[in-house]
Amino acid sequence: MIYESILDTVGRTPVVLLSKVNELAGCEILVKLESFNPGGSIKDRAALSMVTQAERDGRLKPNGTIVESTSGNLGKALALIGAAKGYRVVVVVDPKAPQSMINFVSALGAEIEMVDTPDENGGFQRPRLERVRQLLGELPDAFWPDQYNNPDNPRAHAEVTAAELLADVPRFDALVAAVSTGGHISGLAATVKRHLPEVVTVGVDAEGSAAFGHRPGKYAMRGLGLAWPPGNLDRSLVDRLHRVADSEGIATMRLLARAEGILVGESGGAAVFAALHHALRHPGSRIVVVAADGGTNYLDESFRADAGSGDRPPREAVLADLLAEAAAPRHGQVLLDLDRPAASSGVVG
C-alpha cells in the first residue's frame, strides 16, 4: 500500500499475545503495541488529533509554531507532524528525557528547550509548564496543544483507538493502561464500556505520582505519572488503580524483552505488571494491556543494568520471580470511589 503522507500510517497497531508469560501465569494477557506508530508511541494519535482540530478552528495557522511540554513521546509525535506539515515545533523537556528522544526530535527539525531546575518535590512537570507559558508570550501565533486538558486527546482514543481494539478483540474482561495525561485510558474506557459494560478498567500509576490525589514524590519511570490530577483523566471510567514501583515496572519491561522478544517502554512494563497481578487475582480473565511506547526509547538507561552480565539466570527463573512479585506487589489494586481521593479508597488486593 502507498500512503500519501507518513501521518497516514498513524494507528492500526497490532495486538500480541504474551505466550510464554501466559503459559506460566495461567492467564491470557494481550498487549496492544503502540510502538508501531511512526513516532513510536500512542502519543502520535493524540498529537495528530489535537493539531488537526486546531487547524480546523484556526488556533494553529499555516507555518505556525507548536509549543509543548513533554517528557518524550509527545515531543516525538509533534516533531514528526511539524516536519510533515511545515510547522515550527518547540519542545520543553527536562533531564529525564531520554537522549534517544532528544536525537529524534532534533533530527526532525524541532527545537529543544531544556528545563533543569526541579520544583520543591524534585519534579520537572510544573517548571516545564511555566516555561511553556513564557514561550507563548514570546512567540507570536504559537499554539499550545495542552495535552493534559485538551479534549481532542481522549477523543482520538474514544473514536479511533477503541474501534481498532474492539475490532481485534471483540470480547475481554479487563483493560489495563498507564495514566499520565489520562487521555488514552479515559477515551478508550468511554467507548469500550459502551460496548462491553462489564469490562473492568485498571489505571496504572507510578508510586510517587499525584495523578490520583496521592502525595507527590520522586519516581524514575517515564511515560506515566503526573504531579497533579490531569484534566483529561475521567475517574468515573477507571474502576481500579494500581500504583507500581519503579523496580516492578522496569523488571517487567526487561522480562518481556527476554521472554517474549517484545520491547515495551517503562509505562508498558508497569501496565503488564499490573495486568499480571489482576490475572493472578482473577484466574481465567482475558486482559488487554495498552503498551504506550517501545523499549528502544530506554535502551541506554533502563536496560543498561543487563548489559554485559555474562551469568544471568534463565528466563524461566526470572519470570517465576516476577510472578511472585506480582502476587504480592508493593501496592495492591484499589477500588476507586469518586467521593474520596484514591489515597483513601479501599484496597482489593
Image (cartoon, grey):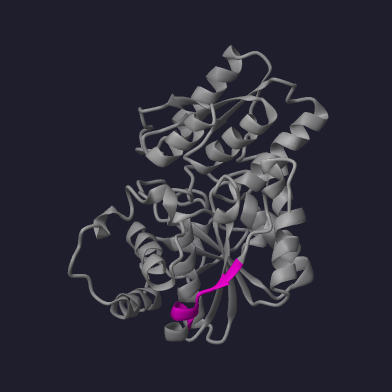
Task: Examine the rendered structure and indicate whether residue 339 appears above or below residue 349.
Answer: above
Residue 338: percent from the left, percent from the top? 63, 59
- Describe residue 209's horizontal placement relative to residue 341 as left or right: left
Which residue is painted at 44% across and 71% down in the image? 260
- Describe residue 263's horizontal placement relative to residue 307 as left or right: right
Q: Is 169 or 348 nearer to us in this picture?
A: 169
Which residue is painted at 60% across and 19% down in the image? 136
The magenta stretch spans which residues? Answer: 15-22
Q: Quadrant of the N terminus?
A: bottom right
Residue farthest left in this picture? 311
Residue 256: percent from the left, percent from the top? 41, 68
Q: Could one spot residue 145 in this view of the protein?
A: no
Q: Could one spot residue 110 in this view of the protein?
A: yes
Q: Is 1 or 42 nearer to us in this picture?
A: 1
Task: Examine the rendered structure and indicate whether residue 278 appears above or below residue 41.
Answer: below
Which residue is painted at 50% across and 75% down in the image? 18
Residue farthest front in this picture? 2
Residue farthest right in this picture? 56
- Total labels: the figure holds 0
Residue 344: percent from the left, percent from the top? 49, 61
Q: Is 128 or 236 nearer to us in this picture?
A: 128
Q: Is residue 96 magenta?
A: no
Residue 295: percent from the left, percent from the top? 43, 55
Q: Is 174 or 50 nearer to us in this picture?
A: 50
